[in-house]
Image (tube, rainbow, N blue to C red):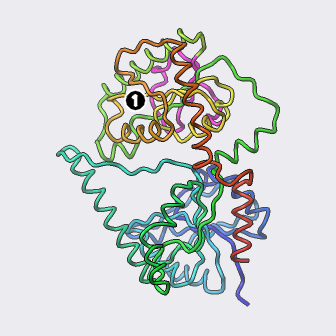
């Protein structure tokens, strides 16, 4: 009898960040399966030279890392296994050979989408400056449609089980063109997903896990959740930033934060983004926290941010949130910024413009915004009651495959 094996399908050159980001679900998997394989296929990507892969000590002890060297190694590993894999791969051309092999060896395909994120679709500004952005956008979209066609033709595998926390996305998938077509022609299965399960987001899980702990005393402080204005996706579209962009942004940000601090009588605390290499002198007037953002949010009274998924923790804790925007953030980041503002109906301030801060008016606007959070939480973060997503994910994997 062919052995049923639980694992993850990845393409990584360093396990450490991946292990940290997924430590909660990894721990749950380790407690429920004898062994869990991390099958690393980075050496099978098109156009990639063989990589030296950095390991990590942060994985559970029964997690086994298997770095596949080539197609023969792939065949040797999978030929005697009924492999059930949680997939962490992009749908771009360099992965096409990998998807072909996954289908050929009948690997069961699971995907987890429980970040509660806003997505990253970008509008294209049709001028010369962003011509490369437009080209890349439609180039990528064309390959996505090719990927879907190859999936329909059974050359690439479908997703056997999708875990999703966004009810609007679930509705769109269940009522899309593919599902409608299948209702008319039931013998033609063209949907990318065979089965969808609703789960709570990781932010909802974190809140559930901490709400039973001793109550955290809220400090008289305003927390600024930092995001670098030279985000790699922005640089790809808009090019490298001149120094005056950094100077202008942090000058205006500091003025805004100082005025906010003065009006509310609270200190400002900065949570720097881990990837932000900005000169800390830009924040010389404020305290820079050594704690994680996720731990600082419950302790703070007001949260200020431009773009950060960490703000969803602030939503769970019903914190007063101020969104900031600036011309120095560029079109890409400002378009993304609008998604947060529109989805959460946030109070947003353009820090480049002179803005008179009135405490009473701010409190009124911020308190009004907080009232809208319950609907967002129910739709996007906690649609599955009090069930922790890690528990349901493992439960449904066992139910469907073991």
Determine which residue is flagged by label 1. 325
- Is 1 placed left or right of 131 in the picture? right
**Residue at the (48%, 41%) spot, across then down:** 343
**Residue at the (56%, 67%) spot, across then down:** 87
Query: Which residue is most to the front?
Result: 184
Helix, strand or loop at mark 1: strand
| Residue 337 percent across, percent down from the top left | 42, 37
Picture quarter with the C terminus: bottom right
Q: Residues within 10 Å of mark 1 (few under 14, many from 20)?
A: many
Query: Which residue is most to the left?
Result: 128
| Residue 154 percent across, percent down from the top left | 46, 83
Q: Is residue 363 above or below residue 384?
A: above
Q: Is residue 83 above or below residue 60?
A: below
Q: Is residue 159 above or below residue 387?
A: below
Picture quarter with the N terminus: bottom right
Range shown magenta: 268-294
Q: Is residue 214 magenta?
A: no
Q: How many marks on residues?
A: 1
| Residue 395 percent across, percent down from the top left | 74, 66
- Is 185 placed left or right of 112 in the picture? left
Q: Is residue 106 above or below residue 370?
A: below
């Amino acid at each position: 009898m062919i052995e049923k094996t639980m694992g993850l399908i990845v393409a990584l050159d360093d396990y450490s960040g991946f292990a940290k980001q997924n430590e909660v679900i990894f721990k749950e998997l380790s407690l429920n399966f004898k062994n869990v394989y991390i099958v690393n296929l980075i050496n099978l990507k098109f156009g990639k030279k063989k990589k030296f892969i950095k390991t990590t000590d942060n994985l559970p002890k029964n997690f086994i890392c298997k770095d596949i060297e080539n197609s023969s190694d792939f065949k040797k590993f999978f030929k005697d296994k009924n492999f059930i894999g949680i997939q962490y791969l992009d749908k771009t051309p360099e992965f096409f050979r990998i998807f072909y092999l996954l289908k050929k060896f009948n690997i069961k395909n699971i995907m987890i989408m429980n970040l509660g994120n806003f997505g990253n679709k970008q509008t294209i500004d049709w001028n010369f400056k962003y011509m490369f952005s437009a080209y890349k956008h439609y180039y990528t979209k064309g390959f996505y449609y090719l990927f879907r066609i190859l999936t329909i033709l059974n050359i690439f595998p479908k997703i056997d089980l999708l875990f999703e926390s966004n009810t609007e996305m679930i509705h769109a998938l269940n009522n899309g063109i593919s599902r409608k077509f299948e209702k008319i022609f039931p013998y033609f299965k063209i949907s990318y997903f065979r089965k969808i399960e609703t789960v709570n987001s990781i932010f909802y899980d974190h809140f559930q896990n901490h709400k039973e702990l001793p109550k955290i005393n809220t400090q008289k402080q305003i927390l600024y959740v930092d995001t670098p204005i030279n985000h790699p996706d922005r640089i790809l579209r808009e090019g490298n930033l001149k120094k005056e962009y950094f100077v202008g942004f942090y000058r205006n940000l500091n003025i805004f934060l100082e005025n906010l601090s003065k009006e509310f009588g609270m200190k400002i605390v900065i949570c720097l983004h881990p990837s932000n290499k900005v000169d800390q002198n830009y924040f010389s007037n404020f305290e820079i926290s050594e704690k994680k953002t996720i731990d600082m949010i419950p302790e703070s009274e007001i949260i200020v941010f431009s773009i950060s998924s960490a703000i969803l923790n602030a939503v769970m804790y019903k914190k007063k949130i101020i969104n900031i925007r600036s011309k120095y953030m560029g079109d890409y980041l400002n378009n993304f910024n609008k998604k947060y503002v529109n989805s959460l109906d946030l109070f947003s301030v353009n820090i480049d413009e002179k803005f008179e801060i009135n405490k009473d008016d701010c409190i009124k606007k911020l308190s009004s915004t907080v009232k809208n959070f319950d609907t967002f939480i129910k739709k996007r973060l906690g649609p599955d009651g009090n069930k922790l997503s890690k528990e349901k994910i493992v439960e449904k994997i066992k139910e469907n495959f073991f």
